[in-house]
Amino acid sequence: MATIETYARPTWLYRHRSLRPRGADGDGAADRERLERELSAIEQGYIWCGKFNEMNDPMEGFYRSNGSAMENPGYEEFVETVRQEKLGLGIASLSETWDNELMWAHYADGFRGICVAYPMARLLECLDGTHALARVAYGDRPHYLNLSAMRDADHRARAILSTKNVKWSYEREWRLFAAHRGEARYVGRGAVTVYLGMRMAAEDRRLVTRRMKAAGITVRRTSVDGYSVRCSDPS
């Protein structure tokens, strides 16, 4: 039986984060509680993994089945089992790119937040066997589950949650899966890099820079050059 092997993988994975509540207006400072939560995660060396139904895509976790599966007497029980499998997982969304302006606009409060860069090799080395990294597959149809999927639970929920509508393909997403909702801990926090959004309030920029430098973490500032997002040398 042939296997699927993936040799091409990014050197870094990136996580764009807002420091203010969703929908906040203007150029005000970050929310102190949210800012503290994000910076503490970096300083303590973990990535927060939430549940799939806490994510922003209302189509998250959809799948389809054929007629034979849906006519099976155990199909309703199967549907509930899959739902519980999905709810049991912890998920963190990362991207292959830090300089996509749409990611900054949608997930980092319009360039007022931050982007955290994680070395892929370090994550693979440090996260234990209950974690997995998966590249998201984009398509026009949800993930397909047939009768064989009803009998084989291995990686079923992860496969469903690694499929998204092609309209989201600009995110170039990878997903970190954990056995449950909570902290996915890694070591070597100094290996990460933090990019500062160009629209960050000055007081937030000073605070983030000071905290990250104290933790031995590299900080870079971003700027716009025409239609490109650039970054400066380490601050």
Image (cartoon, rainbow, N blue to C red):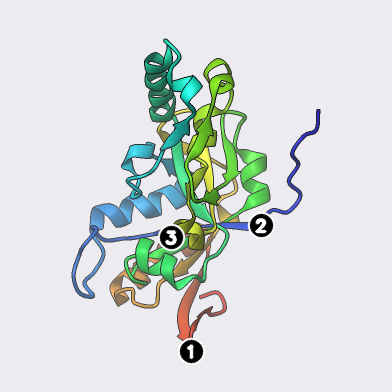
Residue 79 x, y percent position in the rendering: 40, 22
Residue 209 in sight: no
Given residues 202 and 104, the one toward you in this image is 104
Residue 200 in sight: yes
Q: Residue at x 49, y 50 (%)?
A: 140
Q: Residue at x 67, y 41 (%)?
A: 125
**Mark 3 belongs to which amino acid?**
His
Pick whichever of labels 3 and 1 is earlier in the sequence.
3
Q: CA distance from mark 1 to mark 2?
A: 26 Å
Q: CA distance from mark 3 to mark 1?
A: 21 Å
Given residues 11 and 56, the one toward you in this image is 56
Residue most toward the left?
A: 25
Pick whichever of labels 2 and 3 is earlier in the sequence.
2
Q: Quadrant of residue 8?
A: bottom right
Picture layout, residue 137 above or below residue 31? above
Q: Residue at x 33, y 50 (%)?
A: 56
**In the figure, is residue 119 to the left or right of 197?**
right
Residue 89 x, y percent position in the rendering: 44, 31
**Mark 1 belongs to which amino acid?**
Gly
Q: Which residue is mark 3?
A: 16
Picture layout, residue 225 above or below residue 103? below
Picture layout, residue 148 above or below residue 188? above
Q: Residues within 10 Å of mark 3 (few under 14, many from 20)?
A: many
Given residues 45 and 178, the one toward you in this image is 178
Q: Residues within 10 Å of mark 2 (few under 14, many from 20)?
A: few
Q: Which residue is mark 2?
A: 10
Question: What secondary structure is found at the residue carrying circle 1?
Answer: loop
Q: Which residue is mark 1?
A: 226
**Mark 2 belongs to which amino acid?**
Pro
Q: Quadrant of residue 101?
A: bottom left
Residue 127 x, y percent position in the rendering: 59, 37
Picture layout, residue 176 above or below residue 228? above
